[in-house]
Amino acid sequence: MSFNLIHEKWIPVRREDGARELIAPWQISESLNPVTALDAPRADFNGALIQFLIGLVQTTMAPENDRAWRKALTQPPEPRDLKEAFESVSFAFNLDGDGARFMQDLNLDNGEEKEISALLIEAPGGNTLRNNTDFFIKRGVAEQVCLSCVATALFTLQTNAPSGGVGHRTSLRGGGPLTTLILGEFLWETVWLNVLTSGDFIPHDGNSNIDETLDIFPWLRAARTSEKGSGSATTPIDVHPMQVFWGMPRRIRFALADIQEGICDVCGRQVARLARRFVTKNYGVNYEGAWMHPLTPYTEREGEPPNPRKGQPGGVHYRHWLGLVQADAEIGRMPARVVMEFWERQSKWPELHDVFRRAPRLWAFAYDMDNMKARCWYESTMPLSQISEKGRATFEDVVARVVRTATLVAGNVRRCVKQALFRRPSDVSGDLSIVDARFWQGTESAFYSFLREFRDKANDENALAYLKVDWLKTLGSVGERIFNELSQNEQLEISDPKRIALAARELRRLNAPTNKKIRDILDLPKGK
Ligand SMILES: [Zn+2]
């Protein structure tokens, strides 16, 4: 019997009462003791599993219209309905067996055999081993891996694939894409909040050769390889637009001959079957062109293909609100399609928020990739409050000003810390990222209180002005605290009290509510 990802119970979850178990994908809508969250042994696995589920539901049971979407949000479909919908593609979800296998190449003669640990993204490549910098995971730690973890690791790799040396292609969104989605209280909510109506995924009629299933799941055909010379790129019109969820840049096939029973090195479960090796080859599918993944924010500039945002050192904070939660038109940063859809749905259906016991949040996650190597995985969530359609433009304008003011003040702090520490600050290129890290963390809770209070006072100009001044005071005092801590560091060999005092005065001047730049950005009313 083969290990089929539709039939098998392989997805680790937590239920409302805290119970942990493995379920089959169609169980996500069970109403008794409902599933609240994914519960994989690694955080990046949870990020992969949620995309697997959203992709599966989007592919097999997308709602025809808004009405159908609303209905299934308030009354989740029965698990047997999900089972029936998923059954239509189950032939494409065998992880093993002789034929087509989930996210694996049909034929890998003369491939290179590798240990299973190389499938895990942080497994060091040749260079990191040579330089002995593989602190992320100890080599050889994952010698044998269960099929549940193998399936997840495979999806994780195909979905995030970093550059991996000559011909080892990156994911459809490049190496280490940033993923953002709407997080609900229950797993079904989270999946369904990120599913678009079917009209959003009509195949391009420019290509009549597209087959509904064979071109959605690239592993059902011989791989569209991308060797030098013959090199074919794969754009959305070459295949099915839905392939956006099922990209297969890496050519991989598990070697299952030596499969045996034992304990999985990733999740620690005792299982009947463990994988130890896989075969791989370079020049897999080379995704190019105007792919738009609905779960990723993009930078869009005229005359260029949309550029998917990537993970960044330092992670995601409210400083990234512009571009992740709301558009930043000034620099062409657009939130993920599902995030924009969330706001649209809310404006068409003001009762949307009444459905939730707990307000939805934005869930953002990514690897911070350094070329072939993952430096770390980070994720964070941000609350998404309900905004009336009428107040939305004002809300977005004010929030943009509030975030930009914080960016300006953070820059002032950085500059003045430099002035305090160095005689010729312009010559110093030192890393002051610690200033940013502390500043954004130190002002975060004040930002969310601002949003809450602003919602209640949006129509009261006077109250709004006071709120803004309060915000500025918070920024200023957090900035000053960081300045004091860093500039009066006793370990500094040469500190100059006069230079520090001057820089401190300069910081107060730059961040004062009377400063013209600040007044303009924050749009403070004239006078006192
Ligand atoms: Zn496992």
Image (spheres, rainbow, N blue to C red):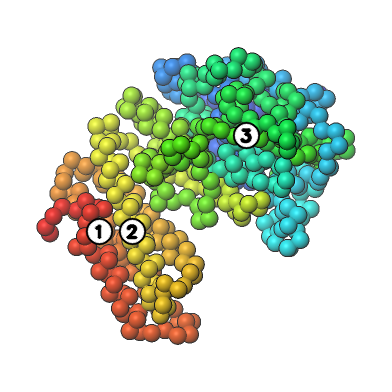
How far apart marks 2 and 3 lie (CA) works out to: 38 Å
Residue 50 vertical placement versus 435 (above, below): above
Q: Is residue 205 left or right of residue 443?
A: right
Tell us which disc is closer to us: 2 or 3. Answer: 3
Nearest the eye: 411 or 46: 411
Rendered image quadrant of residue 87 = top right
Q: Is residue 424 left or right of residue 209?
A: left
Mark 1 highlights which residue? 517
Amino acid type at image mark 3: Tyr
Does label 1 point to a residue whose CB lies under 8 Å from ligand 1? no
Q: Is residue 311 left or right of residue 481?
A: right
The image position of residue 524, as x and y in percent, is: 19, 53
What kind of element bears circle 2? helix
Residue at horizontal 38 percent and vertical 27 percent from the top: 345
- Mark nearer the N terminus (1 vs 2): 2
Q: Residue furthest top?
A: 208
Residue 452 vertical placement versus 190 (above, below): below
How far apart marks 1 and 2 lie (CA) works out to: 9 Å
- Mark nearer the N terminus (2 vs 3): 3
Residue 372 vertical placement versus 12 (above, below): below
What kind of element bears circle 3? strand
Residue at horizontal 30 percent and vertical 78 percent from the top: 502
Mark 2 highlights which residue? 408
Amino acid type at image mark 2: Leu
Q: Circles 1 and 2: CB distance less than 8 Å?
A: yes
How far apart marks 3 and 1 lie (CA) works out to: 44 Å
